[in-house]
Amino acid sequence: MQVNMLDAKNRLSSLVAAAEKGEPVILARNGVAVARIVKYEPPRVQPPGLWKGRCEFAPDWDSPETNQEVEKLLLADDASAA
């Protein structure tokens, strides 16, 4: 359904109810469609631990040597940006 702004101001509750039911609601200004009211869908959140057991890490991923290499790479980026 397409509704002009003035009419939409007076019927907002019923327009939102229509959108909740899945009906397309288009808002128009002077007969030209400018906006749409749609039902809000909350974002799907992945449960914690979904990747557990699916990734392999090198045994030295948190070694002092690896941490130094990473630090050098990060500091090199900071120096080039300055």
Image: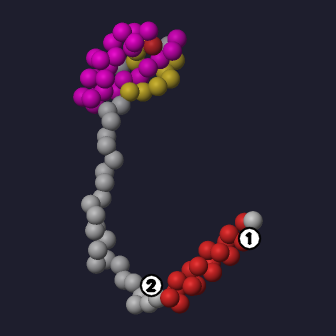
Q: Which span is picked out in magenta? A: 6-30
Number of dots carrying numbers: 2
The type of residue carrying mark 2 is: Asp
- Whether 40 is drawn above or below 71: the answer is above
- Whether 62 is drawn above or below 8: the answer is below
First in sequence: mark 1 vs mark 2? 2
Classify residue 10 as left or right of residue 18. Answer: right
The type of residue carrying mark 1 is: Ser
Residue 80 numbered mark, or none: 1
Please state the horizontal and vertical placement of residue 20, each as a whole percent of the image.
27, 29
Q: Residue furthest front?
A: 64
- Whether 41 is drawn above or below 82: the answer is above
Please state the horizontal and vertical placement of residue 39, each as a whole percent of the image.
32, 33
Q: Which residue is mark 2?
A: 62
Quarter holding the C terminus?
Answer: bottom right
Q: Quadrant of residue 68?
A: bottom right
Question: Which residue is at a point 47% across and 17% down the rendered structure image?
Answer: 28
Question: Which residue is at a point 36% across and 9% down the rendered structure image?
Answer: 10
Classify residue 63 as left or right of residue 39. Answer: right
